[in-house]
Image: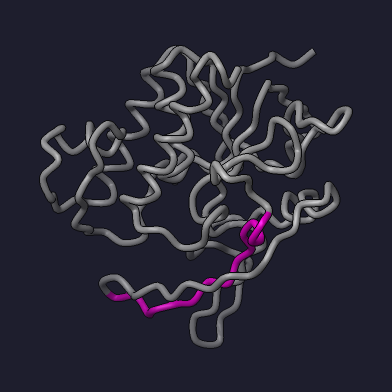
Amino acid sequence: MSRLYELAVVGAGIAGSEAAWAAAREGLDVLLVTTSLDTVYLLAHDRHVLQPPEGTLMHRLLGGSGETAQVRRAQLYLSAKYALESMPNVHLLQSNVTGLVVSNGAVTGLETWEGIRRFADRTVIAAGTFLEPRLSQGELVEAAGRLGEMAYDELSANLRSHGIRLEQESIEMSGGAGELPYTVTFSRFAAGELAADGASTRLAGLYACGSCAHGPLSYEEAAAAGSRLGRLLAQPSAR
């Protein structure tokens, strides 16, 4: 029997990492699943100017001052990964989530590509632009939410099989140093699929956060949304 977590988060981008970190700080036992441990909290380009929202992991990683800061991608990735791995109640898992475990209309865990089920009281989908994405760059078209990164095509199909409606969204990404710009078309939760709280879905125990929930968000918006959901799910009334 697989270990039971209090919260499972699919996607360790900014929104997912923030949700996991905020929930774990409040005492929840959290499973954070990512297709690659090399992409935790990863920014699209090498340098970014960020205005970290107060109370977020981003705010802490950038010194806690709340002032605008120029950040290097590798620096933020390393410090975020270290912060998450340092928390005893966060388990970072490298795997590809292919579907949900559903019992009596409620989500009770995750299916991973290895065939192993991971069980949790509640699950957050924070897959960013990686739900059935198609990246176009010149004549290149690949199934990726960012250049060279794995897509969640099977998870998208599984969400639909459980009655979750998805709709397409596109985002234009500027090229970094020496890179061409590219376009990503991806799936997100359709309008009306999320409850008034902006995160709950029609399936009990399933939540969505970040760009896959509301369309393209800034890094700061994603951080605030993930942190807010993590704190919400840690409240006694939500358990």
Q: Looking at the image, which residue is at 14% across and 34% down?
A: 63
Q: Who is closer to the viewer here, 205 or 159?
A: 205
Residue farthest right in this picture: 104
Q: Quadrant of the N terminus?
A: top right
The magenta stretch spans residue 64: no
Q: Position of residue 8 (x, y in %)?
A: 61, 28
Residue furthest to the front: 196
Horizontal and vertical percent for residue 86? 36, 18
Q: Quadrant of residue 29?
A: top right
Confirm whether the magenta stretch covers residue 191: yes
Q: Residue at x 53, y 14 (%)?
A: 236
Task: State the extent of the magenta-drawn residues as a range.
Answer: 178-192
Of the 4 image quadrants, the one containing the C terminus is: top right
Describe residue 106's horizontal placement relative to residue 148 as left or right. Answer: right
Residue 99 visible? The answer is yes
User: In the image as oriented, which residue stretches furthest toward the bottom?
Assistant: 139
Residue 102 located left or right of residue 34:
right
- Where residue 191 appears, as percent x and y from the top left, is 64, 61
Residue at screen point 65% across, 27% down? 122
Whole-percent x and y of residue 25?
A: 39, 18
